[in-house]
């Protein structure tokens, strides 16, 4: 099947399929004569697997490992469980960070009069180079 058919069947955009091919997650056959991608049912199965793995938050690197394990009939369940347990640890760390962030935001909101005056404790807090209210700096995730 062609890329648009594989995209529909897998639930992923064609752009994602091209990217997954570029980084070597899937390697569809190429049609003789025109070099069009020719996705097999197994390719689509792998794409669906990747879609589900991404949906639960696995990075592309871990998805690669999981897909390799999926393809390996000699895999050990312990290998897969280890990856899931590592992801749980990451999620727990993110939850701790989010709870801390929520606390900081609540403190900011609680310290603000919220009236029509120009003085705003939230703005003042954010303008301070080092605020005791904000003990950490957030950075954007790259995954």
Image (spheres, rainbow, N blue to C red):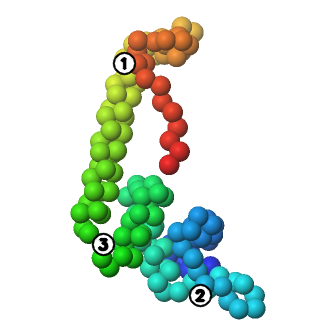
Asked if the residue under mark 3 is in contact with the one under mark 2, i.e. CB atoms within 8 Å, the reply is: no
Dividing the picture into quadrants, the one containing residue 49 is: bottom left
* Horizontal side, residue 96 vs residue 58: left or right: left
Alpha carbons under labels 2 and 3: distance apart: 29 Å
Q: In the picture, which quadrant includes the N terminus?
A: bottom right
* Horizontal side, residue 120 vs residue 81: left or right: right
Give the camera-side residue of 38 and 9: 38
Q: Nearer the viewer, mark 2 or mark 1?
A: 2
Dividing the picture into quadrants, the one containing residue 113 is: top left
**Mark 2 falls on what kind of element?**
loop
* Horizontal side, residue 84 vs residue 59: left or right: left
**Mark 1 falls on what kind of element?**
helix
Name the residue tied to disc 1: 107
Q: Earlier in the sequence, mark 2 or mark 3?
A: 2
Q: Position of residue 74 (x, y in %)?
A: 30, 76
Residue at 43% across, 18% down? 134
- Residue 34 higher or lower than 16, as above or below: below
Residue at 40% across, 15% down? 133
Q: Position of residue 70 (x, y in %)?
A: 36, 73
Q: Nearer the viewer, mark 1 or mark 3?
A: 3
- Residue 35 higher or lower than 137, as above or below: below
Which residue sits furthest left?
A: 78
Q: Earlier in the sequence, mark 1 or mark 3?
A: 3
Asked if the residue under mark 3 is in contact with the one under mark 1, i.e. CB atoms within 8 Å, the reply is: no
Name the residue tied to disc 2: 1
Name the residue tied to disc 3: 75
- Mark 3 Cα shell of 10 Å, populated few (<14), some (14-19), many (≥20): few
- Residue 111 higher or lower than 25, as above or below: above
Residue at 62% across, 79% down? 3
Alpha carbons under labels 1 and 3: distance apart: 49 Å
Residue at 71% across, 91% down? 32
């Amino acid at each position: 099947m062609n890329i648009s058919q594989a995209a529909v069947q897998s639930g992923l955009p064609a752009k994602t399929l091209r990217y997954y091919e570029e980084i070597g997650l899937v390697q569809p056959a190429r049609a003789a004569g025109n070099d069009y991608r020719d996705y097999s049912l197994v390719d689509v199965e792998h794409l669906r697997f990747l879609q589900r793995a991404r949906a639960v938050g696995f990075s592309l690197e871990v998805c690669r490992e999981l897909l390799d394990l999926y393809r390996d009939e000699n895999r050990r369940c312990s290998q897969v469980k280890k990856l899931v347990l590592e992801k749980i640890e990451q999620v727990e760390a993110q939850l701790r960070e989010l709870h801390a962030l929520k606390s900081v935001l609540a403190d900011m909101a609680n310290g603000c009069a919220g009236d029509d005056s120009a003085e705003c404790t939230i703005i003042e807090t954010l303008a301070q180079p080092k605020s005791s209210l904000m003990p950490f700096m957030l950075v954007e995730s790259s995954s």
